[in-house]
């Protein structure tokens, strides 16, 4: 297995069907977002996503792609997230692939609170 690989690139504004870019395969998740997340937040969301996926946890959010969005945004309000992305002038493609190692960086208090919110929200989605 390779080290974690994360890519974020801007989506061209003239693309009509963004859904064709969203997806999940055995090793990577790809999603459309409206911001460039801090590296530590994106890394943590990816780590939590693949942890739940690998453990086979049942989740009340049936779509893995939507579950990944909730982790990135730190919110369970899916409609609000989707509307925010839809109405945004800029959109980004985030691709996150599996990681064999857990390389956590030292983080400040604000980022730690955001990570805690992500963790709490992910637990609330479990059945």
Image: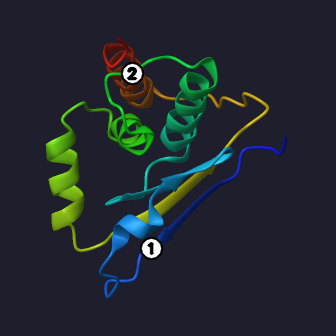
User: Along the horizontal axis of the image, is 37 left or right of 29?
Assistant: left
Residue 125 image point, x, y percent: 33, 19
Q: Nearer the viewer, residue 28 or 92?
A: 28
Under circle 2, the secondary element is loop
- Considering the image in quadrants, where does the C terminus appear? top left
Q: Residues within 10 Å of mark 2 (few under 14, many from 20)?
A: some
Circle 1 is placed at which residue position?
10
Residue drawn at 42 percent across, 68 percent down: 20
Look at discs 2 and 1 and give the one toward the viewer: 2
> Percent from the top left, x then y, of residue 55?
61, 18
The residue tagged 2 is 59
Identified at 35% across, 16% down, the residue is: 120
Q: Nearer the viewer, residue 33 or 62?
A: 62
Label 1 sits on a secondary structure element that is strand
- Picture quadrant where residue 117 is located: top left
Which quarter of the rendering shows the N terminus? top right
């Amino acid at each position: 297995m390779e080290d974690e690989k994360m890519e974020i690139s801007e989506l061209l504004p003239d693309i009509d069907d963004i859904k064709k870019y969203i997806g999940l395969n055995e090793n990577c998740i790809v999603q459309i977002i409206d911001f460039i997340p801090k590296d530590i937040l994106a890394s943590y969301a990816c780590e939590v996503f693949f942890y739940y996926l690998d453990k086979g946890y049942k989740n009340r959010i049936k779509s893995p792609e939507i579950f990944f969005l909730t982790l990135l945004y730190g919110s369970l309000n899916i409609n609000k997230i989707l509307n925010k992305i839809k109405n945004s002038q800029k959109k980004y493609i985030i691709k996150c692939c599996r990681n064999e190692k857990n390389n956590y960086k030292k983080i400040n208090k604000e980022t730690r609170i955001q990570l805690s919110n992500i963790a709490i929200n992910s637990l609330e989605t479990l059945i």
